[in-house]
């Protein structure tokens, strides 16, 4: 069976309304539906590269040097996507992150892969 091919069908380009930079109205009634959805928040203190031999030699008390200095800002990611910058703080012997800058929507979009 061969597919039917239409001929002499008028075709025109799609017409879209121009995009607006105005803030979008959020329907507060619907936002409550997703408030309990869990998100993965990640703060990366730094990175380093080691050979397999160096990793196998690690023991309790070993120090792994990272590529960031103490006091440098850290990146905060939500579900693997950049959201903000912050600084590491210590509260009652626990580590935390104080958010110092939240990325604009344009900046977050530019960082998408």
Image (cartoon, helix red, strand yellow):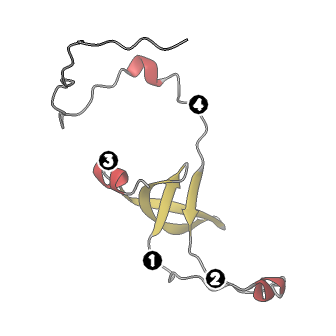
Q: CA distance from mark 4 to mark 1?
A: 32 Å
Labels 3 and 2: the sequence-earlier one = 2
Q: Residue at x 28, y 13 (%)?
A: 7
Vertical arrangement, residue 5 with respect to residue 61, above or below? above
71 sits left or right of 39 in the view? left
Q: Quadrant of the C terminus?
A: bottom left
- Residue placed most toward the observer, 53 or 32: 53
Label 1 belongs to which residue?
72
- Which residue is label 3 attached to? 105
Which numbered mark, 2 or 1, is in the foreground of this view?
Answer: 2
State which quadrant residue 48 falls in.
bottom right
Front label number (4 vs 3): 3
Q: Which residue bears the numbered disc 4?
A: 36
Which quadrant would residue 13 be assigned to in this image?
Answer: top left
Task: Identify the disc placed on residue 84.
Answer: none
Q: How far, Cα to Cα, is label 3 from label 2?
A: 32 Å
Residue at numbered disc 2: 49
Q: Residues within 10 Å of mark 2 (few under 14, many from 20)?
A: few
Whole-number angstrom distance, CA of label 2 to CA of label 1? 19 Å
Q: Earlier in the sequence, mark 4 or mark 1?
A: 4
Q: Residue 16: x percent and y percent?
A: 19, 25
For the point 45% across and 24% down, the residue is: 31
Decide which of tag 4 and tag 3 comes sooner along the chain: 4
Question: On the rendered image, what quadrant is the N terminus found in?
Answer: top right
Q: Residue at x 17, y 33 (%)?
A: 20
C-alpha separation, residue under disc 4 versus residue under disc 2: 37 Å
């Amino acid at each position: 069976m061969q597919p039917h091919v239409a001929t002499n069908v008028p075709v025109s380009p799609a017409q879209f309304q121009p995009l607006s930079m105005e803030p979008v109205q959020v329907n507060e009634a619907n936002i409550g539906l997703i408030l309990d959805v869990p998100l993965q928040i990640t703060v990366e203190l730094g990175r380093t590269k080691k050979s397999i031999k160096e990793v196998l030699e690690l023991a309790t008390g070993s120090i792994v040097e990272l590529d960031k200095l103490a006091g440098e800002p850290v990146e905060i990611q939500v579900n693997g996507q950049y959201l903000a910058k912050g600084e590491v703080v210590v509260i009652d012997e626990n580590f935390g992150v104080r958010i110092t800058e939240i990325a604009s929507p344009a900046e977050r979009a530019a960082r998408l892969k």
